[in-house]
Image (tube, rainbow, N blue to C red):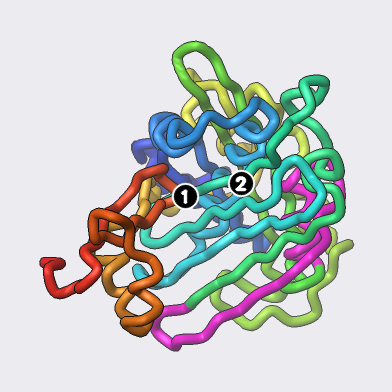
Amino acid sequence: MTDTTAAETETGFDTVLRFILPDRDCRGRLVRLGPVLDEILSAHDYPPPVKHCLAEALVLTALMGSMLKDEQDQMTIQARSEEGLIRLLVCDYRDGALRGYAEVAPDVPTQVGANPRLETLFGRGHLAVTFDLASTGQRYQGIVPLEGENLSQAIETYFAQSEQLPTRVSTAMAFGQDGGIAGGMLVQHLADGEEGRERLHVRFDHPEWEHVSILADTISYGELVDQALSMEALVWRLFNEERELRTDGVAHLRKGCRCSIEHYATILGRFGEAERAEMVNEEGDIVVDCAFCSRQFAIPASLDDVS
């Protein structure tokens, strides 16, 4: 008999649903983005393949970032290349705040479809995943090649190589006249015990993990972006035959660009007066562009006038 907790948990857009399969030593996350996705993507007029890739990156960032423990912890995904359609892609998560940006090559070929392979988007590139832990001041980073069909496969490679965690990731994106929807699921096996215990003797062929990964692979593209299907109903559909399935609440997401005049004034204060003088325009201000939200900020050169 399956026992679910928090059965009435809200599972609308822009939330992450956490779930646990205790008997299988597995944990998972489901996310579905809506208005937050549209707000982030609207900052730039991205070509369809870039919009699709950035939406997938935002889903992955939400899935992984929601596993952070402390409010000020931050998780960042950065994909970089020198010869692809996308030169730089950056997304980060901190305390439910999500943001993302892509730097696009000057000319995107018209023959490129909406969902090309990573090789077409990035050429030869790499993906860096960084965790900044506020409580300890420590930073952890793993770097893997941008190889495979999509970013989800690259993230699975990251977990396999950098953290030795068997992981399955599924994502889906759909765009229409009324906006976009992006969904995703991440499932992991925590060997030799529940979440929080030391991970020993990780086996990618563990029978418990093989069972869960087979079930996870049955999720469909359409289910992930079906707004009529709640995330709680979806996780129940996948794992309803398990003896125990626990839902562990939701994390609410919002667009989280941290740009402000005060923020940039603090950064500029690290430069010397001579260096700042070279940045000043004819009006006597230093103009700073925020790539994430496509806004400009005019900072008084003296910095003393910044309140």
Place residue 82 in its image quadrant. bottom right
Crowding at mark 2 (Cα within 10 Å: few <14, some 14-19, many 20+): some
Quarter of the image that includes the C terminus: bottom left
Q: Residue furthest front?
A: 282
Answer above or below: position of 178 versus 170.
above
Using the image, tell me which numbered label, if any, was put on residue 103: 2
Q: Could you tell me if the residues under marks 1 and 2 are in contact, i.e. CB atoms within 8 Å? A: yes
Residue 90's x, y, as percent?
A: 57, 54
Can residue 19 be seen by looking at this rendering? no
Crowding at mark 1 (Cα within 10 Å: few <14, some 14-19, many 20+): some
Answer above or below: position of 84 versus 195.
above
Distance in Å between CA atoms under marks 1 and 2: 9 Å
Quarter of the image that includes the N terminus: top right
SS for callout 1: loop
Place residue 238 in its image quadrant. top right
- The residue carrying mark 1 is 291
Using the image, tell me which numbered label, if any, was put on residue 234: none
**Image point 47% across, 46% down: which residue?**
17
**Image point 73% across, 32% down: which residue?**
107
Q: Disc 1 marks which amino acid?
A: Ala
Task: Examine the structure image and report whether residue 172 is included in the region drawn in magenta.
Answer: no
On screen, residue 275 versus residue 30, left or right, reads left
Residue 185's x, y, as percent?
A: 62, 43
On screen, residue 127 versus residue 232, left or right, reads right
**Image point 57% across, 58% down: which residue?**
64
